[in-house]
Amino acid sequence: MSRSATLPPIRVTPETKAGLEAVLRDGETLTQFIEQAVCREAEFRAEQAAAAARARKALRAADKGVGRLSEQDFLAGMQRRAEAAQRRIRAAVAAKTRP
């Protein structure tokens, strides 16, 4: 089991602190709120970095011509996806309107 660590203290205006305290949930402390916010932001940034890495890899592959589709194949695939989406939407609407 590892020991806990302390994050550096941050200075905020009294208005900012009051605004933060105003949105706390019942029983939630400002420390808990800040810890959750920091963890969520770190997760978001990690996902963002991973997505950027995947995009760079896809761009390199596209530059090399790997997996490149013809314009007709691309448009046909998009048409199939659009038609499938329309079918799903129509089915969902029909299911909602049934008694």
Image: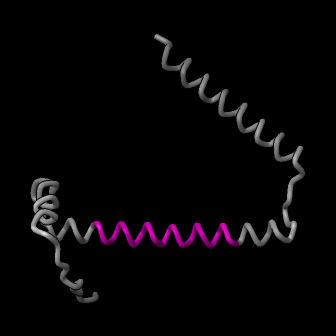
Residue 36 located left or right of residue 69: left
In the drawing, does residue 43 fall left or right of residue 80? left
Judging depth in this view, the residue of 19 and 94 nearest the camera is: 19
Query: Which quarter of the image is occupied by the N terminus?
Result: bottom left
Magenta span contains residue 98: no
Question: Residue at image x 89%, y 44%?
Answer: 72
Q: Is residue 40 magenta?
A: yes
Image coloring type: one colour
In the displayed structure, 49 sits above or below 97; it is: below
State the extent of the magenta-drawn residues as a range. Answer: 37-56
The answer to which quarter of the image holds residue 3 is bottom left
Residue 4 higher or lower than 39, as above or below: below
> Can you say whether 21 is above or below 50 in the image?
above
Q: How many marks?
A: 0
**Is 18 situated above or below 83?**
below
Which residue corresponds to the image point at 54% horizontal and 72% vertical from the top-left?
49
Q: Nearer the viewer, residue 90 or 71?
A: 71
Name which residue lies at 48% across and 19% down: 96
x and y, in percent, of residue 54 in the image: 65, 69
How far across and down, in percent of the image, does residue 69 sit? Answer: 86, 54
Task: Give the quadrant of residue 83.
Answer: top right
Q: Is residue 11 left or right of residue 80?
A: left
- Residue 65 appears at what percent x and percent y? 87, 66
Q: Main secondary structure of the magenta part?
A: helix
- Percent across and percent down for residue 33 are 21, 65
What residue do we see at 25% from left, 71% from top? 35
Foreground residue, 99 or 18?
A: 18
